[in-house]
């Protein structure tokens, strides 16, 4: 019965973004400063470690959580105190419950008399729309199990933490990949975690059903471009952990921003000429980028494919008119 | 006969030094300051290639479309201004090349061959210690990650983890999935560098180029490259200069100037080979 419930919940969850899925094994790479990248669990996972404990950005797919927690434990035996979700998709939130349970939340003297664990596991931070999309009103089946919901949300702008000796900014990017996207910026380590606003494995997946838009996506990429400062001779400096794919820096992001903007401009011009969606799809406006970025999905129009991206851009721009 | 065998067995291990390391290592010494000769492809390497001159480059249809969309005004965007010439292209430019070896201080085993390319101030490491290439998730760089081995007196280098970068600096670019094979061949004071770029996304077959360099006796010929981007043109935030499909005004400029067929200027593997001239003659092109 529990298995059936899990299947029903999974069926209600939003689409998994394209690109790397599970490889069966978790690979850990040091990015820089206090920040590490875990790959192989679906979406990329970032882990910040230090004297105070562990902060985890995104938690991967649910079936990988044992391996994810084990990989975190290899980096640090300090308590996992915070989980931050960059957005709602289950390849980034599927492990929330398990990672939360592996952690703890300290509470202060007014509650317990002593500084101690509140017994609810780690806190899960996210933009408020992530909670709205994972939960549901009373009597309605929620899209995700209760234990995986964010425990602390913010509405707009940014939320700030100071953890392990560095400022951490959680910065909302409205209506981009979804309506609940956050960038997570580790200011001393100089690493930004982007969620699926930026991926190196496919075209952007603009999730229109969950409030994404092409203009929000481009705005977010431009925000990210301004946040990331390249190092000596235009490489390194601020490192960027995309939602899927490899560690990047500003010049890598620049290629992607240019690509998304150019394709937007082409489709915008086509709409102004009165071209229909089938005509735009047939025009091959992404052909110069298909070989690099069109995702290889089972369905020809799956998330991250050229077909899916063109349709999302067209509908997003047409809706704006 | 048994006497000869016994004699061989009583010899110390062949060419082993006192510490067990072979002092007569394979390869040649490439160390020194080298300067490029510009007799090959001078026009392209000096003033630079014309816009929409893709002749003789085995590009894919996608790479051609990318090139036709590319607007040189993109260089005015601050984030693009300090872009380094990628490792597969940097040896085409004007530069000084300093090569030296990095050896283990105790065993004197060769760890790496290092290169300083003063154009863009790039220091390149070619690992010679059989180490593995990094994970797929590791960052990509302008010089990539290189491992080398001696094949006789030829240094053969294999490079992965490159960023996207120029095939030709008029809009033809390879992706970050490209790989590079190189051979450094020394003939006295002359060094020949052969590069073989492979990128199935932008090239239908590997692009092979050679460059030649000569040994320079004067030391210290190094330039600096302190690049600092500036706003050259005020534009709305996020503007990316490019040509919409069919609107590149320079499509015919190169072809018309040099009186070659427009289709030849658009490149492709076919345009690399002499047989292409015969094909053009058959179609009546001049």
Image (tube, coloured by chain):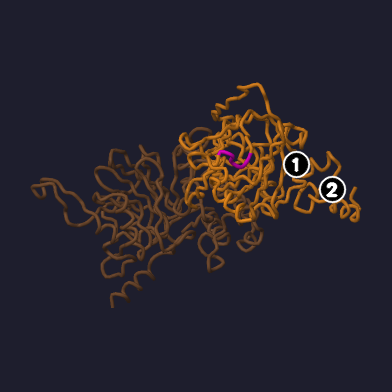
Q: Quadrant of the N terminus of chain A?
A: bottom left
- According to the image, label 2 marks what residue? B261
* Residue A125 versus residue A298 in the image, above or below: above
Q: Residues within 10 Å of mark 2 (few under 14, many from 20)?
A: some
- According to the image, label 1 marks what residue? B250
Q: Position of residue A280 (x, y in %)?
A: 63, 59
Q: Position of residue A165 (x, y in %)?
A: 28, 38
Question: Mark 1 or mark 2, which is nearer to you?
Answer: 2
Residue range corresponding to the magenta coloring: B23-27
Q: Is residue B40 left or right of residue A114?
A: right
- Marks 1 and 2, how far apart in space? 14 Å
* SS at badge 2: loop
Residue at the image position 72 percent from the left and 41 percent from the top: B210
Marks 1 and 2: same chain?
yes
B45 or B14, nearer to the observer: B14
Kindly tell me whether residue B194 is visible in this rendering. Answer: yes
Mark count:
2
Say whether residue A269 is magenta. Answer: no
Query: Which callout, 1 or 2, points at the residue further toward the start of the chain?
Result: 1
Residue at the image position 54 percent from the left and 56 percent from the top: A313
* SS at badge 1: loop
Chain shown orange: that is: B
Chain shown brown: that is: A
- Farthest-out residue, bottom: A1
B77 or B1, nearer to the observer: B1
Q: Is residue A151 left or right of residue B184?
A: left
Residue at the image position 68 percent from the left and 33 percent from the top: B93
Q: Say which chain tag 1 marks.
A: B
């Amino acid at each position: 019965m529990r298995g059936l419930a899990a299947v029903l919940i999974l069926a209600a969850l939003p689409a998994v973004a394209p690109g790397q899925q599970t490889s069966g094994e978790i690979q850990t790479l040091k990015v820089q400063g206090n920040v590490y990248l875990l790959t192989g669990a679906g979406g990329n996972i970032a882990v910040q470690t230090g004297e105070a404990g562990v902060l985890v950005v995104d938690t991967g797919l649910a079936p990988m959580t044992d391996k994810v927690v084990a990989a975190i434990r290899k980096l640090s035996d300090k308590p996992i105190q915070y989980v931050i979700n960059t957005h709602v998709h289950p390849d980034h939130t599927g492990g929330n419950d398990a990672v939360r349970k592996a952690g703890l939340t300290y509470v202060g003297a007014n509650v317990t008399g002593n500084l101690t664990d509140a017994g609810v596991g780690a806190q899960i931070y996210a933009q408020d729309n992530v909670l709205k999309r994972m939960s549901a009103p009373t009597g309605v089946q929620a899209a995700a199990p209760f234990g995986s919901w964010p425990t602390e949300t913010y509405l707009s702008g940014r939320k700030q933490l100071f953890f392990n000796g560095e400022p951490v900014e959680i910065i909302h990017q409205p209506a981009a990949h979804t309506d609940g996207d956050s960038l997570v910026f580790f200011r001393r380590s100089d690493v930004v975690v982007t969620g699926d606003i930026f991926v190196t494995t496919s075209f952007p997946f603009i999730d229109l059903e969950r409030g994404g838009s092409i203009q929000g996506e481009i705005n977010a990429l431009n925000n990210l471009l301004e946040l990331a400062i390249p190092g000596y001779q235009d490489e390194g400096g601020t490192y960027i952990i995309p939602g899927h794919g490899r560690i990047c820096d500003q010049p890598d992001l620049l290629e992607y921003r240019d690509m998304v903007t150019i394709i937007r401009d082409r489709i915008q011009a086509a709409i102004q000429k009165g071209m229909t969606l089938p005509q735009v799809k047939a025009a091959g406006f992404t052909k110069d980028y298909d070989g690099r970025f069109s995702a290889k999905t089972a369905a020809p129009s799956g998330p991250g494919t050229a077909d899916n991206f063109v349709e999302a851009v067209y509908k997003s721009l047409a809706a704006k008119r | 006969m048994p006497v000869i065998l016994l004699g061989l067995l009583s010899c110390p291990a062949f060419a082993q030094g006192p510490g067990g390391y072979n002092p007569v290592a394979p390869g040649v010494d490439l160390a020194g300051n080298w300067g490029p000769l510009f007799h090959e492809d001078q026009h392209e390497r000096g003033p630079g290639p014309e816009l929409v001159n893709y002749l003789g480059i085995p590009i894919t249809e996608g790479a051609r479309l990318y090139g036709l969309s590319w607007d040189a005004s993109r260089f005015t965007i601050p984030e693009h201004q300090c872009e380094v010439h990628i490792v597969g292209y940097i040896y085409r430019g004007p530069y000084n090349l300093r090569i030296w070896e990095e050896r283990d201080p105790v065993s004197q085993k060769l760890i790496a061959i290092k290169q300083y390319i003063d154009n863009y101030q790039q220091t390149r490491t070619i690992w010679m210690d059989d180490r593995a290439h990094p994970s797929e998730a590791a960052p990509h760089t302008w010089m990539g990650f290189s491992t080398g081995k001696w094949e006789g007196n030829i240094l053969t280098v294999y490079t992965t983890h490159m960023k996207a970068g120029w095939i030709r600096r008029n809009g033809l670019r390879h992706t970050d999935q490209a790989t590079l094979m190189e051979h450094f061949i020394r003939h006295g004071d002359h060094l020949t560098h052969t590069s073989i770029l492979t990128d199935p996304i932008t090239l239908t077959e590997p692009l092979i180029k050679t460059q030649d360099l000569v040994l320079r006796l004067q030391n210290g010929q190094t330039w600096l490259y302190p690049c600092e981007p500036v706003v050259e043109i005020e534009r709305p935030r996020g503007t990316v200069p490019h040509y919409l499909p069919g609107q590149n005004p320079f499509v015919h400029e190169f072809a018309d100037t040099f009186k070659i067929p427009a289709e030849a200027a658009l490149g492709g593997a076919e345009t690399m080979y002499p047989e292409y001239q015969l094909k053009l003659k058959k179609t009546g092109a001049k």
